Image (cartoon, grey):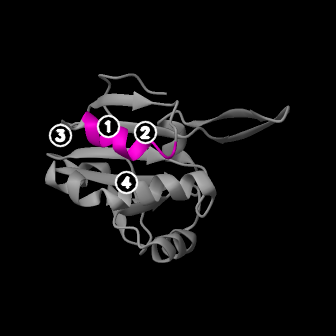
Amino acid sequence: MLEIGTKAPGFELPDQNGEMHKLSDYAGRKVILYFYPKDNTAGCTKQACGFSERYPQFTEKGAVILGVSKDSVASHKRFEEKYGLAFTLLADLERKVMEAYDVWKEKKNYGKVSMGVVRTTYLIDEQGVIIKANDKVKAADDPENMLKELD
């Protein structure tokens, strides 16, 4: 996980519509950048729907939400449409952004070791500096916790 107070690494990734997004596009706004393992899984769906339900409150506070996984643009589009998600999902197929943000790690599941995404949420300020970082994310609680961080 990257340290609070460090400059957030820049990136350019396609969204669920195939449009490219750069972190620098959001200069002057707070960015909630969250990394999740997989579209259409229980925890990831809870987290995404929670952010979507609270989306008007996030925009009121001047924040943008970007969800990142290694799923494809087409997978993100299906996920967005199935749940009516109101924010941007970014496809990091090559895991370059996940590696830059130090969220692609060795994980143990039932004694089996594999590489995967550690569910992590970053809050980036208007100048592109990380002001909050959490790699102990509870999917269902994350949206409400991040909303409180904006107060």
Location of residue 28 (image quadrant): top left
Q: Which residues are magenta?
A: 139-149
Q: Which residue is mark 3?
A: 126
In percent of the image, x 54 and y 39: which residue is there? 99
Q: Which residue is mark 4?
A: 66
Other residues around mark 1 within 10 Å, as few (<14) / some (14–19) / many (≥20):
many
Q: Which residue is mark 1?
A: 123
Residue 99 is left or right of residue 87, and the answer is: right
- In this picture, is 98 found above or below 131? below
User: Where's residue 100, x and y in %?
Assistant: 48, 37
Instruction: Decide whether residue 142 is among the magenta residues.
Output: yes
Location of residue 45 (image quadrant): bottom right
Q: Do tag 4 and tag 1 residues touch (Cβ < 8 Å)?
A: no
User: Where's residue 92, x and y in %?
Assistant: 52, 55
Q: Which residue is mark 2?
A: 121
Q: Earlier in the sequence, mark 4 or mark 3?
A: 4
What number of labels is visible?
4
